[in-house]
Structure formats: C-alpha cells, structure tokens
Image (spheres, rainbow, N blue to C red):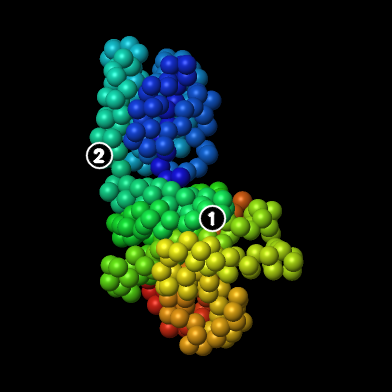
C-alpha cells in the first residue's frame, strides 16, 4: 500500500539488517537482479546493494532507470569498491546518491529519508502517507468486521486527517492514480470514495470537523462487504440475481456491525445504511425517497457511484472520467442534479 522501498541485492543472505533499517522508513521489499520493475505501485525509493560490474546487476538497474525516467525516484547506490570508476558507473545506472557498502544500515536509511525529502515533492509524499494511513485504518476496520469483533472507531480516526491533507496538498488526481494501482477491489473502492469525499468536502468548504465526519463516513461506508462471501464480492463481471441479493445486504450489515460496536455516530450510521438509497425510492435497503434521503447520503452516493464507475479492475477497461460524469448527470431523479453539478465542479 502506498509507497514501497525496494532493496535490490545480489547477496540476500546479508540483507536482513539493511531491510530491517529500511522498514523503519516504510514498507520494504527485497528483490534480486531479475527484478523487472513492471509490477506497478508507487516506489518511494530504491537501495541498490549490487556488484555493478556484473552484467545482470547493470541490466537490472538499466531497466529501473528506463521505467522511472523523468520521475523523482531516489536511488541509493551502495558501492563495494571506493573508486571513481564505480562511482561513475553507479551514477550512469541511475543512483542519485552513493555510499560505501560497509556503512551501518541506519546510515543508509537516513540517507534515503534525506533523498526522499529532497527529491519527492511534498504533495506526492502527502499522498503516499495518506494512502498508507487510510489503508491501515481500513484494514483494521475490515479485519475487525470480518472477525466479528467490536469495531473500534479509534482505528478509523487515524486515517482521516491524512486523507484530507493528501487530497489538499497532493491533489485528487494523484490520490486516484495511487489508489487505482491497488489490486484489492474493496480497498481500492473505499479509498477512492474517501478521496472523492475529501475533495467534495473541501470544494463545498465544509468546516474541519464536518470534513472529517464526511470522510469518516466515506471510508467506512462499505464495511458490510467484510461479511459478503469473497466469490461474490470479487466476482469478475456481472452478478446473477441471487448474488445481487446477497451483495445488497452489505448496507444493512455494515450498519449492524457499526451499531453493535456502540462507538459509531448517527451521521456515519445513516450514511452506511443508506448509501444505496435513491431520491426516487428505487434504492435499498429501506426504499427511502425524497426528503427521507439525507444530505450526507445524497453527497456520498454521488462519490460512491463515480468511484464504482471509474475503478480499475483487471478484467474490464475503466470508464473515462468524463463518461462517468455523464452517467451521473443521466441519473436525474435518482440523484440531486444540483449536487451532481457541484461534484463535477469539485473534480474540475
Ligand atoms: Fe455500497
Ligand atoms: Fe461503495
């Protein structure tokens, strides 16, 4: 989730201490010289612990350099030989800073932090941080819901300010790009809705506590999906009528899960239960219509549908953002047209 640090090494037997130090900075993956750098996701930085004169090591770093050309990617080159020639080679292969391979792991980690701060723009860092914190909050929430244990709203709280800061400082486009690379459908969806809700709340100039309230409801709105069987939840393509009926229970299930926890506010409970209600009464689970559909529900429903239309799944081509807006505009009568227009302006 979020930014990963990659330690690329040709001596994995000696990488444990270095990987442990890098994990103090962020999630760290240890790979060998066969790494192709095509697996997607945002890289926070790379540490290369390689004998650079070996063709496979040079080939691996050249692929990295090609893949991230033009992007701010800190690459720490650990040099096994202190010579001008190896320094030159490391720089040619994309190292943004070089250190002797014998320096303590903590020194490498500190150098990486400095490099990230110097080379990764503040907005990008805010998004990486926001996606990571929101992802952790969501993971705890879904785990608790799945296990049937009591939901602690405290775990959700830690994700809220980072989402708003990320969208404010890094921009919605960056948030969406980062989240779209997540391959778990429920995570991707909930983080998309949370980012869209943050943008909508900022655009509507909500007060800070109202922004938090709305983003909280967005982050947890589909918590009921934790109790939907995975073959239905993650089914590629359309659900049959029986499966749809099961899937639709998630709204009331989510409400029950949060209500049973005893810590959830009425605003969030309303949004969780009713985020599939439509103003014309055609929604579920309660078939509410007109004024019975509250303003927060009307706002979140727009974010939710837009997120579902634009989500990235392996088996389908994503809908373009302009086409998704056109779908929302075509739902006049079900959604409040004025709010759809306002949402369009928030995305512009
Ligand atoms: Fe839902
Ligand atoms: Fe949803």
Quarter-of-image position of residue 313:
bottom right
On screen, residue 345 versus residue 115, left or right, reads right
For label 1, the residue is 145
Q: CA distance from mark 2 to mark 1?
A: 40 Å
Element under disc 2: helix
Nearest to viewer (mark 2 / mark 1): 1
Label 2 beta carbon less than 8 Å to ligand 2: no
Binning the other alpha carbons within 10 Å of mark 1 as few (below 14), some (14 to 19) or many (20 upward) gives: many
Q: Residue at x 43, y 56 (%)?
A: 152
Quarter-of-image position of residue 6:
top left
Question: Looking at the image, which is closer to me, 278 or 167?
Answer: 278
Q: Quick one: which residue is furthest to the bottom in this view?
A: 290
**Which label's residue is closer to the chain start, 2 or 1?**
2
Is residue 158 something that shows in the picture? yes
Q: Residue at x 47, y 83 (%)?
A: 337
Question: Looking at the image, which is closer to me, 175 or 223?
Answer: 223
Q: Is residue 85 above or below residue 327?
A: above
Q: Residue at x 47, y 50 (%)?
A: 140
């Amino acid at each position: 989730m979020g930014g990963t640090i990659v330690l690329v090494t040709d001596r994995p037997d000696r990488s444990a201490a270095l990987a442990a130090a890098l994990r103090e900075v962020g999630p760290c993956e240890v790979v060998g010289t066969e790494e192709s750098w095509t697996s997607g996701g945002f890289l926070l930085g790379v540490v290369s612990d390689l004998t650079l004169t070996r063709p496979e090591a040079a080939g691996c770093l050249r692929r990295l350099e090609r893949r991230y050309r033009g992007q701010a990617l800190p690459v720490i080159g650990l040099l096994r030989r202190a010579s001008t020639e190896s320094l030159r080679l490391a720089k040619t292969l994309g190292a943004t800073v070089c250190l002797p391979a014998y320096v303590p792991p903590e020194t490498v980690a500190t150098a990486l932090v400095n490099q990230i701060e110097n080379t990764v723009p503040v907005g990008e860092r805010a998004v990486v941080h926001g996606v990571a914190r929101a992802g952790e909050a969501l993971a705890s929430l879904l785990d608790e819901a799945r296990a049937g244990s009591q939901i602690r709203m405290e775990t959700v709280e830690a994700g809220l300010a980072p989402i708003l800061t990320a969208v404010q400082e890094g921009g919605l486009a960056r948030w969406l790009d980062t989240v779209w690379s997540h391959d778990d459908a429920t995570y991707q969806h909930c983080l998309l809705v949370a980012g869209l809700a943050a943008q909508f709340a900022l655009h509507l100039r909500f007060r800070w506590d109202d922004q938090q309230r709305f983003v909280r409801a967005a982050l947890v709105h589909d918590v009921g999906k934790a109790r939907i069987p995975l073959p239905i939840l993650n089914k590629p393509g359309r659900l049959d009528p029986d499966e749809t009926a099961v899937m639709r229970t998630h709204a009331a299930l989510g409400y029950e899960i949060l209500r049973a926890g005893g810590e959830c506010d009425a605003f969030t409970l309303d949004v969780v239960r009713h985020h599939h209600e439509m103003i014309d009464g055609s929604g579920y689970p309660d078939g509410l219509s007109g004024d019975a559909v509250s303003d927060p529900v009307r706002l979140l429903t727009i974010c939710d549908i837009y997120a579902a239309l634009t989500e990235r799944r392996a088996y389908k081509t994503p809908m373009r953002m302009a086409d998704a807006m056109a779908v929302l505009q075509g739902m006049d009568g079900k959604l409040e047209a004025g709010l759809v227009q306002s949402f369009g302006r928030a995305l512009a």
